[in-house]
Image: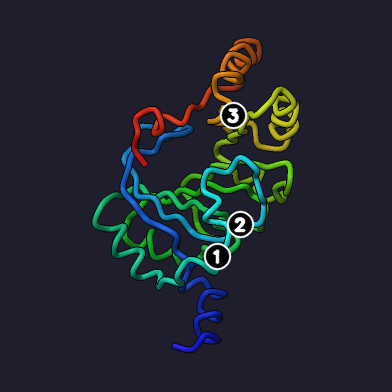
Amino acid sequence: MSTAVITEMVDKGVMLPLMEEFYTIQGEGYHKGTAAYFIRIGGCDVGCHWCDVKESWNAATHPPTPIHNIVQNAAKYSKTIVITGGEPLTWDMGPLTSALKEQGMSVHIETSGAYPMSGTWDWVCLSPKKMKLPVAEAYAAANELKVIVYNKHDLIFAEEQAAKVSGDCILYLQPEWSKRDTVIPMIVDYVMENPKWKVSLQTHKYLNIP
């Protein structure tokens, strides 16, 4: 298959730059503790300095993979699918989510919301970043808002973001892993003073699983 053909198929979303796929326990947010199949798509230009999967940023390093292969693999493991990245909305998620839902799967996304929404989702976890803010439709689609807290200024940012999502959106503050010992006490105090928020922890890291 020529490079031009592959590029066209990636642009259409029928092939995607697949970084990795694995079956594990969802460690964060509303669905924590749930067995889920993760599909990590390469490509991201948001550039979070504390990102723990920087190897996902360059899409060119991840092989364009036909979505039917991805769906076949996912179907072996779980009915709950989490599509993450990178930033998966860099690409057209319509073909992949349609194929997954045809198999009766519940399809979730973890996104910064920096790109227009595509695909059909059962759950949208919006994790906005200061460097590249979400588009308006991402706020409207969010089922949960997860703000990563690196320092106290992120709490101000969190409130700014919470003002843009729907009243039904669940609000989470999650400590940035490398700063957890510093920021967890601050988050706990903040949530107790502002109980519309909940605490999210990266429980998979405490459990030492992917």
Asked whether disc 1 touches disc 3, contact meaning CB atoms under 8 Å apart, the reply is: no
Label 2 Cα neighbours within 10 Å, binned few <14 / some 14-19 / many ≥20: many
Q: Quadrant of the C terminus?
A: top left
| Amino acid type, residue under disc 2 in the picture | Cys
Q: Residue furthest left?
A: 76
Q: CA distance from mark 2 to mark 3?
A: 24 Å
Instruction: Where is residue 139? Give x, y as percent.
Output: 66, 43
Q: Which residue is mark 3?
A: 171
Q: Which residue is mark 2?
A: 44
Residue at x 38%, y 60% (from the top left corner): 100
Q: Name the foreground residue: 203 vs 106.
A: 203
Residue at x 61%, y 57% (from the top left corner): 44
Instruction: Where is residue 157? Give x, y as percent.
Output: 74, 31
The tag earlier along the polypeptide, 2 or 3, is: 2
Q: In the figure, 21 relative to 198: above or below? A: below
| Amino acid type, residue under disc 1 in the picture | Ala
Q: Name the foreground residue: 153 vs 170.
A: 153
Instruction: Where is residue 143? Give x, y as percent.
Output: 55, 39
Asked whether disc 2 touches disc 1, contact meaning CB atoms under 8 Å apart, the reply is: no
- Tell which tag, 1 or 3, sits nearer the viewer: 1
Q: Name the foreground residue: 30 vs 132.
A: 132
| Amino acid type, residue under disc 3 in the picture | Leu
Q: Which residue is mark 1?
A: 59
Q: CA distance from mark 2 to mark 1?
A: 8 Å
Which SS class for mark 1? helix
Instruction: Where is residue 111? Give x, y as percent.
Output: 57, 48
Which SS class for mark 2? loop
Residue at x 63%, y 15% (from the top left corner): 186
Which SS class for mark 3? strand
